[in-house]
């Protein structure tokens, strides 16, 4: 049903890794937003002294083996970062532009609760399982975080490796958010609770793509 | 015997497409050629079919850039036909007339089927998923504002044919057609309906198909701006071989005969008009002089480009046409015209499926051969010409915008024009002093002037109309030679001037020689005779365009990275998990104050 949409975004999701003495360590997912090699991802995973690289995930379309022993990464730099919104814009060094579909960024403000969404990412990259997995959910809520960032809560499970991936509105096939991870109510409200309330949710949350757009504007590109 | 204006021996006896004006397209031609060259150069045309002798540095004025096969074979066919027709003109007249009625009778159904298939295909593209494809790539922006672009399409809808046949055709059908009792109100309704059929959606769907194909394959695929490029999905690189040559030759020959015929017929009309006004007489000598004069003007405009005089005159000309329209609308039977405009459109749409597929099967006549089949063949022969122009002004438009613009704008303008002039003539005939039918039967070109005579200031308006026609011809000769030159130079969008002069002069010569040799009807036949095989080309074009769109759509579905060889190969290792928690991030810090928790937020960590 969503096959064309999935084909659109699969190959745009890349594994964000950092170098570490002759090998690469997986950090999270980043996704391409511009043909000159710009990617968006979640900012909290990045440290200033990391040597960042991106690696294309196992090319989808067929049954793919789940682990790559050795990879050829593309070096990448942080072009813009916004820690308060937790988004970062990365730039790859490319010799030629990427062939990208057009109009991939959608309209987050008009994506309401109940809209079906898809998440793309490499959920188990840390375990060297380098396959993109697509999950489906629904927007459960639209929140404004304490620092007034627009968030989408959705009910697809997010594994750690998916963080930084795109949240796609499956009704119009465009990206509306950058996946941030599992939504944990306790940590969010920062309560110190005497007893273990045992509340963990299966919900996940994503930051609205408009902050990614703002970073792009700062960088001088249009997405 | 009912007088059919399209049979041989009648003066000024055939319609021709109103798309032979295209002034304001010329107004931006200069800019366009530069822009087009830039775009094509930047999309790697050089590898794909530009003549290898063509370099971007144009040295001097005197240069040639010909595709050897297309140029010389087309010129040979055309000159050869002309010579043969001259030498054997009595016999050839018979040969051509037999050919024409044979083709129309045997192939009439094919023409009707083809135009309907093309119309349906264009509607399909409009609503298909290919509608979002942008001509020029997904980042391209339109060259012109929407209003400016529409205005150019409007002007493509104006033409000499409209000036004359806007009046004459409805009157002809009113006075006799197989579809209604002559000279009744029903006949009037049907007359407008038939005229709308011939000048409405079908011709513009044909031009839309060709224009869209040319635009897509040259802007999006970087192929040369020529008919052969449209067949890339079907024939691949072989379009640069003999198949492509055949296609281009057919397009060139059709276009040249179409333009030359228009020139010849139009000159007859100008002659008839001058005679009616100033009694200068009609005859071959006068018409030769007129052709020579108009061709001279056209060559002058080719040489001088579009600055100064010609550009100014072109703009003025459109205003003259608009003024004539307003004049007749306001001083004529305004209420009748406005009522008719709405009713004609409704009637047209309502009877479209029936009328468009009517083949005169059960009526056993040959009326349709003389009108509908003729028109279809002629529009098909003209389609490379019009298609090339509308392609060039439509950079940056999506397929959907293009189809809507090309189908709706010129058609509506045409309908309004025909309604204004045709219904005025009908009004005079049905409710007024009459006399138009007789005038039209005697001499078509005069019909416009007869109608204008019923209005005040008739001398002024008639002279304006004549000037308008002459200007339309000059510009269409200029643009015709441009298009032919583009095709025969293998797709060079800025063809060298000496070559253009060759074609402009050849057009005039062909028209003149055939006028002298009495073979104008032979030209008409040649245009329809090239229309039939070109109809096959158009059907294949539908297939090819669809395939081209599908490939394009699929290839831009996802991201494709360029290969990257420079990187070193590194091993992947299992790494520590990023906490999937949400608590450690600034998102959860209230602005301007500490949060409730006693512990400050910890540093982001991996």
Image (cartoon, coloured by chain):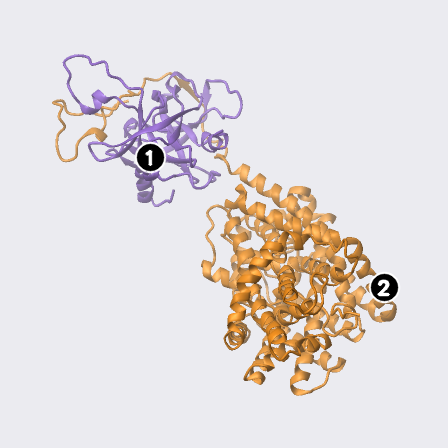
Q: Is residue A213 left or right of residue A60?
A: left
Residue B229 seen in the figure: no
Residue B314: x and y in percent read 54, 72
Q: Chain of mark 1?
A: A
Residue B583: x and y in percent read 22, 23
**Local crowd size for mark 1, using a 10 Å CA cut-off: few (<14), some (14–19), many (≥20):** some
Q: Check residue A40 in the rendering and tell me which mark sits there, or answer none.
A: none
Element type where label 1 sits in the image: loop
Residue B74: x and y in percent read 74, 60
- Using the image, determine if residue B306 lies above or below residue B199: below
Residue B334: x and y in percent read 51, 72
Q: Give the orange chain's letter.
A: B
Q: How many marks?
A: 2
Residue in the picture at 18% in, 30% down = B589
Pointer 1: what residue? A112
Q: Give the purple chain's letter.
A: A
Element type where label 2 sits in the image: helix
- Using the image, determine if residue A34 lies above or below residue B56: above
């Amino acid at each position: 049903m969503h096959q064309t949409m999935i084909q659109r975004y699969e190959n745009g999701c890349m594994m964000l890794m950092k170098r570490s003495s002759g090998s690469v360590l997986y950090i999270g997912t980043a996704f391409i937003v511009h043909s000159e090699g710009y990617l968006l991802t979640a900012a909290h995973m990045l440290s200033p002294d990391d040597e960042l690289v991106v690696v294309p995930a196992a090319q989808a379309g067929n049954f793919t083996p789940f682990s790559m022993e050795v990879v050829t990464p593309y070096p990448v730099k942080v072009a813009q970062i916004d820690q308060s919104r937790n988004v970062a814009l990365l730039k790859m060094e490319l010799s030629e532009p990427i062939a990208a579909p057009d109009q991939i960024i959608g309209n987050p403000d008009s994506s309401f609760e109940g809209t079906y969404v898809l998440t793309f990412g490499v959920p188990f990259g840390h375990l060297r399982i380098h396959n993109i997995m697509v999950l489906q959910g629904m927007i459960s809520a639209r929140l404004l975080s304490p620092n007034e960032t627009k968030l989408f809560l959705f009910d697809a499970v997010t594994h750690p490796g998916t963080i930084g991936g795109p949240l796609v509105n499956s009704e119009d096939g465009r990206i509306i958010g950058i996946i941030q991870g599992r939504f944990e109510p306790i940590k969010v409200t920062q309560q110190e609770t005497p007893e273990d309330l045992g509340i963990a949710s299966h919900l996940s949350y994503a930051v609205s793509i408009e902050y990614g757009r703002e970073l792009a504007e700062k960088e001088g590109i249009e997405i | 015997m009912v007088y059919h204006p399209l049979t041989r021996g009648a003066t000024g006896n055939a319609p021709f497409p109103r798309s032979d004006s295209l002034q304001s397209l010329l107004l931006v031609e200069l800019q366009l050629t530069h822009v087009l060259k830039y775009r094509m150069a930047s999309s790697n045309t050089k590898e794909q079919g530009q003549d290898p002798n063509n370099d971007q540095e144009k040295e001097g004025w005197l240069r040639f850039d010909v595709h050897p096969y297309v140029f010389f074979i087309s010129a040979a066919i055309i000159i050869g036909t002309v010579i043969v027709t001259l030498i054997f003109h009595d016999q050839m007249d018979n040969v051509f007339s037999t050919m024409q009625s044979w083709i129309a009778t045997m192939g009439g159904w094919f023409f009707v089927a083809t135009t309907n298939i093309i119309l349906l295909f264009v509607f399909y593209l409009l609503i298909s998923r290919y509608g979002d494809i942008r001509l020029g790539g997904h980042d391209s922006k339109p060259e012109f504002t929407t209003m400016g672009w529409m205005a150019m399409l409007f002007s493509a809808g104006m033409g000499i044919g409209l000036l004359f046949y806007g009046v004459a055709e409805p009157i002809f059908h009113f006075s006799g057609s197989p579809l209604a009792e002559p000279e009744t109100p029903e006949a009037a309704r049907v007359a407008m309906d038939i005229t709308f059929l011939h000048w409405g959606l079908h011709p513009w769907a044909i031009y839309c198909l060709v224009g869209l194909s040319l635009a897509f394959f040259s802007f999006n695929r970087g192929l040369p701006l020529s008919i052969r490029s449209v067949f890339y999905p079907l024939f691949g690189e072989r379009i640069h071989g003999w198949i492509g040559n055949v296609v281009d030759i057919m397009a060139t020959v059709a276009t040249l005969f179409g333009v030359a015929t228009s020139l010849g017929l139009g000159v007859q009309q100008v002659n008839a008009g001058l005679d009616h006004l100033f009694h200068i007489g009609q005859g071959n000598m006068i018409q030769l002089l007129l052709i020579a004069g108009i061709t001279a003007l056209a060559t002058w405009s080719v040489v001088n480009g579009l600055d100064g005089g010609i550009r100014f005159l072109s703009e003025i000309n459109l205003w003259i046409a608009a003024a004539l329209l307003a004049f007749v609308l306001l001083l004529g039977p305004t209420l009748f015209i406005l009522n008719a405009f709405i009713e004609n459109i409704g009637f047209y749409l309502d009877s479209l499926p029936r009328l468009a597929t009517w083949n005169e099967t059960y009526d056993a006549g040959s009326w349709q051969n003389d009108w509908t089949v003729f028109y279809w063949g002629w529009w098909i022969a003209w389609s490379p010409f019009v298609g090339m122009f509308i392609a060039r002004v439509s950079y940056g438009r999506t397929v959907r915008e293009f189809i809507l613009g090309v189908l709706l704008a010129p058609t509506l303008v045409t309908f309004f024009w025909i309604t204004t002039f045709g219904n005025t003539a009908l009004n005079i005939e049905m409710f007024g002093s009459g006399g138009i039918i007789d005038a039209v039967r005697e001499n078509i070109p005069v019909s416009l002037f007869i109608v204008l005579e019923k209005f005040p200031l008739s001398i002024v308006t008639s002279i304006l109309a004549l000037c308008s026609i002459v200007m339309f011809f000059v510009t269409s000769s200029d643009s015709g030679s441009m298009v032919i030159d583009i095709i025969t130079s293998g797709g060079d969008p800025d063809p060298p001037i000496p070559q253009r002069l060759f074609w402009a002069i050849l057009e005039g010569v062909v028209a003149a020689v055939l006028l002298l040799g009495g073979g104008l009807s032979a030209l008409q036949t040649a245009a329809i005779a090239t229309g039939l095989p070109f109809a096959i080309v158009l059907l294949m074009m539908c297939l090819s365009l669809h395939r081209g769109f599908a490939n394009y759509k699929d290839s831009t579905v996802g991201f494709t990275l360029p290969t990257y060889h420079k990187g070193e190969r590194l091993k992947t290792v299992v790494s520590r998990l990023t906490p999937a928690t949400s608590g450690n991030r600034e998102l959860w810090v209230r602005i301007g104050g500490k949060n409730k928790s006693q512990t400050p937020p910890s540093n982001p960590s991996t």
